[in-house]
Amino acid sequence: MTKFRNYDNKRLILSVIVLIPLTVMMLLIGNLNSQNVYSHANPISFTPPSNSVIGVNGTLPEKVVIVFSERPEPKASYIHVTNSNNERVDKNDYGINSNNPRESLVSVDTSKLKPGIYTVSWLALSRDDGHITKGSYVFTVSRASNGSETGMRAKTNNDFVNSTIINNVNVSYSISPFYSGINNNFTISLSDPDGKAPTNVKTVFLIFSNKQAGLGPISAELTKADEGQYSGSGGYLSQPGEWQAKIVVQRNEAYDLNHSFTFDIKNPS
């Protein structure tokens, strides 16, 4: 009887030894999964809003404010505001709102805000998970007080047009009037080999970066204009030089379509 009782005790001890590391492993996996869901300090809101137009005769922004999903570390994070000549127009006083640790801000020298396109470049080191995120967005200061007219239009068109085939989908894209420092129009057309528009497209993005100027990624979500036709406009190409662009077409029940290309763009004469 004692022999069987000792055997049962050994089995119990062995089971505990096996279960403890398994339990610890499952807790670690659960913790990692929760971190993956909520990790990174991603922007929730921008002030001024992304791709907005502000009247130079109206109220100019005295601050640029970005609210993140996590708390930025002020010693390692920043917000820079530059004009179309890549000159800083912020006061280099980046800080965190004392009432909201997820809100970061920088003051703007409004005397330097002339009509034109301004790029806000940001970097955030999360105090919650230690990850770094970065990106850019643009806003426009208009000559018109109501912000309805940018006052910056190219006299002649210099359109950029190209096409490619990705996973048996024809992708045509264009930029017009294809000058930096002004609002450009962006169009993307999608069709299958028979010329029909795909029906499973969810969203279409254009993502821009200018490594030489340290700008980007600047993301623009295009809107559906017609079947297979997507368009948008904005001052995303705020400075001349070489830009890298990426088309991302997200589809239902299918892999994303991705296409990268580069181009040189100049200011209008």
Image (spheres, rainbow, N blue to C red):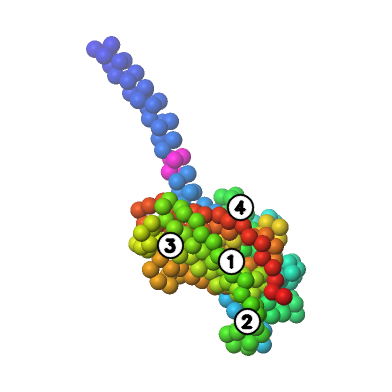
Image side of residue 160 versus residue 268, left or right: left
Of the numbered discs in the image, which one, if any, rests on residue 132?
4
The answer to whether the residues at label 3 and label 1 have Cβ atoms under 8 Å apart is no
Query: Mark 4 vs mark 1: which is more N-terminal?
Result: 4
The answer to whether the residues at label 4 and label 1 have Cβ atoms under 8 Å apart is no
Say which of 240 and 91 sits in front.
240
Query: Mark 4 vs mark 3: which is more N-terminal?
Result: 4
CA gap, disc 4 to disc 1? 34 Å
Q: Looking at the image, which residue is at 46% across and 68% down? A: 230
Of the numbered discs in the image, which one, if any, rests on residue 150?
2
Query: Mark 2 vs mark 4: which is more N-terminal?
Result: 4
CA gap, disc 2 to disc 4? 34 Å
Element type at marker 2? loop
Of the numbered discs in the image, which one, if any, rests on residue 190?
3
Say which of 107 and 258 sits in front.
258
CA gap, disc 4 to disc 3? 34 Å
Task: Please identify, in this view, whether the residue under mark 4 or under mark 3 is nearer the observer.
Answer: 3
The kind of residue on which mark 1 rests is Phe
Q: Quadrant of the N terminus?
A: top left
Compared to 195, does 60 lie above or below?
Answer: below
Q: Which residue matches tag 1?
A: 160
Q: Quadrant of the C terminus?
A: bottom right
Within 10 Å of disc 3 (Cα), the crowding (few <14, some 14-19, many 20+) is many
The kind of residue on which mark 2 rests is Thr
The kind of residue on which mark 4 rests is Ile
CA gap, disc 3 to disc 1? 17 Å
Task: Please identify, in this view, whether the residue under mark 2 or under mark 4 is nearer the observer.
Answer: 2
Image side of residue 199 versus residue 214, left or right: left
Total labels: the figure holds 4
Within 10 Å of disc 4 (Cα), the crowding (few <14, some 14-19, many 20+) is some
CA gap, disc 2 to disc 1? 22 Å
Q: Note whether residue 138 is visible.
A: no
